[in-house]
Amino acid sequence: MMSNVTNNTLTSVNQIKHLTPSTYIVRIERRELEFRAGQYILLGLPGYKNKREYSIYSGEMDPFIEVLIKEIQDGVVSKQLKEIRPGTKLVMDGPFGFFTLSPEQIETGKFLFIASGTGIAPFHSFVRSFAGLDYTILHGVRYLDEGYGKDDYDPKRYILCTTKDPEGNFHGRVTEYIKNHPVDNQTLCYLCGNSNMIHEMHDILTEQGVPNKNLHAEVYF
């Protein structure tokens, strides 16, 4: 998909919403950006060379762009963006990436979205973009309050796996959940988040008979 946004386009912050002490959503002007759900953009402050990749959290038809950001202890951009206010100018570049859904499978495919932490972002975009999508989300976090945007999903389709908090839907890691709940080999599996989770999950799903053509991954760190 072609974008109407040129490199290093200036956009304005509309809103910043803090979800936890370290995680927040930034809403910016869309500036006619065309993107496919699952793609990412680069964001940074004008005058600084550092920009970082953030998956688009909003849907394809939303009149704004949102990104979900976790402040990184040794990070630069995530700390800078946490302090911005509405009206702040940001540099936006993109969209980029191929972590997207096949148009011919959106209507008929059965999807399993497996995320750790802020890796939920592209899946939030998928669900907002495609009404009637046949999906299940498996979201791995430590604590209950890290279930970012959980109320935006059909509760029958969203499974929160918590490792530190026993009040989630499943107490344990997403890999443990899948070991206990094998996946049908026709399921289209999308993995996003921590690289260790993705590698382990890939091995588990492969052992369960899910073919490589049905496995798609986006590594965050």
Image (spheres, rainbow, N blue to C red):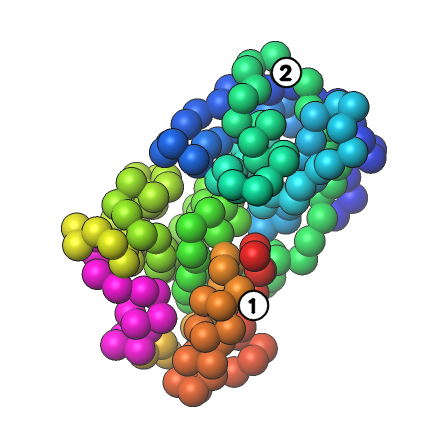
Residue 172 versus residue 139: which sits nearer the camera? 172
Measure the C-alpha gap from mark 1 to mark 2.
35 Å
Q: Quadrant of residue 3?
A: top right
Q: Which residues are magenta?
A: 168-181
Residue at the image point whose x is 41% and y is 27% from the top: 18
Residue at the image point whose x is 41% and y is 80% from the top: 204
Depicted 24 relative to depicted 103: above or below: above
Measured from the top left, where is residue 185 in percent x and y?
A: 42, 81
Secondary structure at numbered mark 2? loop
Q: Residue furthest left?
A: 167
Determine crowd level at label 2: few under 14, some 14-19, many 20+ residues with C-alpha closer than 10 A: some
Measured from the top left, where is residue 179 in percent x and y?
A: 31, 78
Q: Are marks 1 and 2 in contact (CB under 8 Å)?
A: no
Depicted 203 relative to depicted 3: above or below: below
Residue 208 versus residue 74: which sits nearer the camera? 74
Q: Which residue position is annotated with label 2? A: 88
Residue 126's disc is: none
Determine crowd level at label 1: few under 14, some 14-19, many 20+ residues with C-alpha closer than 10 A: some
Depicted 213 relative to depicted 162: above or below: below
Q: Quadrant of residue 80?
A: top right
Residue at the image point whose x is 49% and y is 60% from the top: 194
Q: Residue furthest front?
A: 74
Amino acid type, callout 2: Thr
Amino acid type, callout 1: His
Q: Which residue position is annotated with label 1? A: 216
Q: Quadrant of residue 176?
A: bottom left
Point out the frontmost of discs 1 and 2.
2
Image quadrant occupied by the C terminus: bottom right
Secondary structure at numbered mark 1? strand
Q: Is residue 177 magenta?
A: yes
Which of the marked residues, 1 or 2, is nearer the chain's N terminus? Answer: 2
One can see residue 131 in this view: yes
